[in-house]
Amino acid sequence: VFAELVDPTNGNRTSADGIRCDIDGNVWAGARPGVQIVAPDGVTIGVIRLPEVCANVCFGGSKRNRLFMTASQSLYSVYVGVRGAGVA
């Protein structure tokens, strides 16, 4: 097991739907209550909260520093301080 995702609003375990990696090796996982960012050592280092369950994520934009998040009825985006990993 790489990491256990926990919903920070209630402490219950949750699961990821779509995942992407950034250039630092962190995993960005669409889950409850939005996107959870997990470091290579399995520690959750951040959460981007959404009003809906996040189904999938991807990095885009000319610098790959814009995170797009799809949810049940909406599409969200935010600029982040890291670039998404490129295609190998």
Image (cartoon, rainbow, N blue to C red):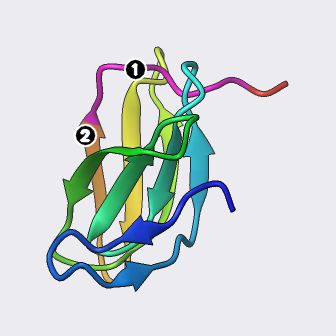
| Residue at screen point 43% across, 80% down | 14
Residue holding disc 2? 78
| Residue at screen point 40% across, 81% down | 13
Residue holding disc 1? 82
Say which of 87 and 31 sits in front: 31
44 up-or-down from 30: above or below: above
| Quarter where residue 80 is shown | top left
| Residue at screen point 31% across, 82% down | 73
Where residue 64 appears, as percent x and y from the top left, is: 49, 23
Q: Secondary structure at mark 1?
A: loop
Where residue 71 appears, as percent x and y from the top left, is: 36, 74
Quadrant containing the N terminus is: bottom right
The part of the chain drawn in magenta is: 79-86
Callout in the foreground (1, 2): 1
Q: Amino acid at mark 1?
A: Val
Where residue 40 appears, as percent x and y from the top left, is: 58, 34
50 up-or-down from 11: above or below: above
Left or right relative to 4: residue 19: right
| Separation of residues labelled 1 and 2 (CA atoms) | 12 Å
Q: Residue furthest right?
A: 88
Instruction: Tell me the tag on residue 39.
Output: none
| Quarter where residue 19 is shown | bottom right
Q: Amino acid at mark 2?
A: Val
Q: Secondary structure at mark 2?
A: strand
83 up-or-down from 34: above or below: above
The 10 Å Cα crowd at callout 1, few under 14, some 14 to 19, many 20 or more, is some
Where residue 8 appears, as percent x and y from the top left, is: 21, 69
Quadrant containing the C terminus is: top right
| Quarter where residue 36 is shown | bottom left
